Image (cartoon, rainbow, N blue to C red):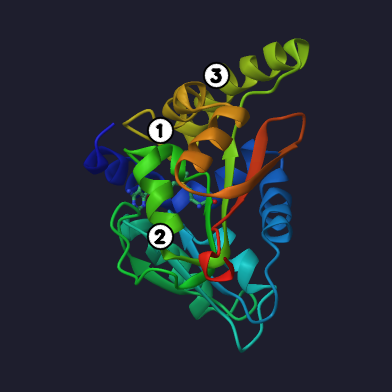
Amino acid sequence: MSDKRIQNLFAAVAYHYDFLNSLLSLRRDSAWRRETVKASGVDLRSKVLDVCTGTGELALAYADKIGAEGFVIASDFCFEMLVIGDEKVERKERGTGASFLAADTLILPFLDDTFDVVSVGFGIRNVSDLEMGIREMARVAAPGGRVVILEFTQPVNPLFRSLYYFYFTKILPFIGNLISRSQDDAYGYLPRSVMKFPNCEALKAVMEQCGLTDVRFYRKTFGIVSIHVGKKPDNRLT
Ligand SMILES: C[S@@+](CC[C@H](N)C(=O)[O-])C[C@H]1O[C@@H](n2cnc3c(N)ncnc32)[C@H](O)[C@@H]1O
């Protein structure tokens, strides 16, 4: 799908996005984000960039754990999603908040080696060039910093997978498209894009190709989602 179509697709569902995430994941989405923050190893002083941030839920989960000496920047190229995230900060809903910024993940407007953690939740699957997106995330990560990816994946247990796929490919798109009134079949695009996305081992291999080391992944909720964490090598130590 072209970047323009992706922008339009998310712009159209932005208003219902958080509600539907919570409903369709049976409220697991917040726990997955908290687990991602934990796996990233952030501390009170961390500088965090959350790309493809959408309405900022993952960025704000980081903000909950970061003190006044750290900060969170939340970037996305869909204005309508960013506005909803920014409103949460205005209402002081969560932690230290985050600074929302319009930016394409494929050309991030930051210097090399800037952030302790560069993170993405349910977003890298939508970036038109996966490897380029991860390379760009790695570029702006500090030496020794982490690139963290929370993404849907394909469950490995065949019995669970067939039950889950019935829900994921039939029920979820029906409810999602009905409530969001998506004209672009946004919630049918979700399972289609997940089926085409690399599995956990393949995503690990792509992260390694992008220069990240010590790549580990953790499957969550019967393997519906995974959290990958890779480290940017610190060549100053050699
Ligand atoms: C499924 S939403 C994920 C939102 C959020 N991270 C979450 O955890 O729910 C995917 C987001 O990726 C954004 N996106 C896709 N490609 C992008 C790109 N090249 N640059 C910036 N944002 C992009 C979309 O605009 C959308 O807001």
Q: Secondary structure at mark 3?
A: helix
What is the crowding at mark 1: few (fewer than 14 residues within 10 Å), some, or many (at least 20)? many
Residue 15: x and y, percent? 43, 53
Identify the amino acid type marked 1: Ala
Numbered tag placed on residue 186 in the rendering: 1
Identify the amino acid type marked 3: Thr
Report the residue marked by disc 2.
Answer: 139
What is the crowding at mark 3: few (fewer than 14 residues within 10 Å), some, or many (at least 20)? some
Q: Nearer the viewer, residue 179 or 135?
A: 135
Q: Which quadrant: the C terminus?
A: bottom right
Residue 131: x and y, percent? 39, 40
Residue 70: x and y, percent? 59, 82
Q: CA distance from mark 3 to mark 1?
A: 12 Å
Sooner in the amino-acid sequence: mark 3 or mark 1? 3
Q: CA distance from mark 2 to mark 3?
A: 35 Å
Sooner in the amino-acid sequence: mark 2 or mark 3? 2
Q: Secondary structure at mark 2?
A: helix
Give the number of the mark in front: 2 or 3. 2
Residue 151 occupies quadrant: top right
Q: CA distance from mark 1 to mark 2?
A: 31 Å
Depicted 203 relative to depicted 114: above or below: above
Counting every numbered tag in the picture gives 3
Residue 103 occupies quadrant: bottom left
Q: Secondary structure at mark 1?
A: helix
Report the residue marked by disc 3.
Answer: 169
Residue 6 occupies quadrant: top left
**Residue 203 seen in the current view:** yes
Give the number of the mark in front: 1 or 2. 2
Considering every residue shown, the one lying at the far front of the view is 238
> Which residue occupies 40% across, 60% down?
139
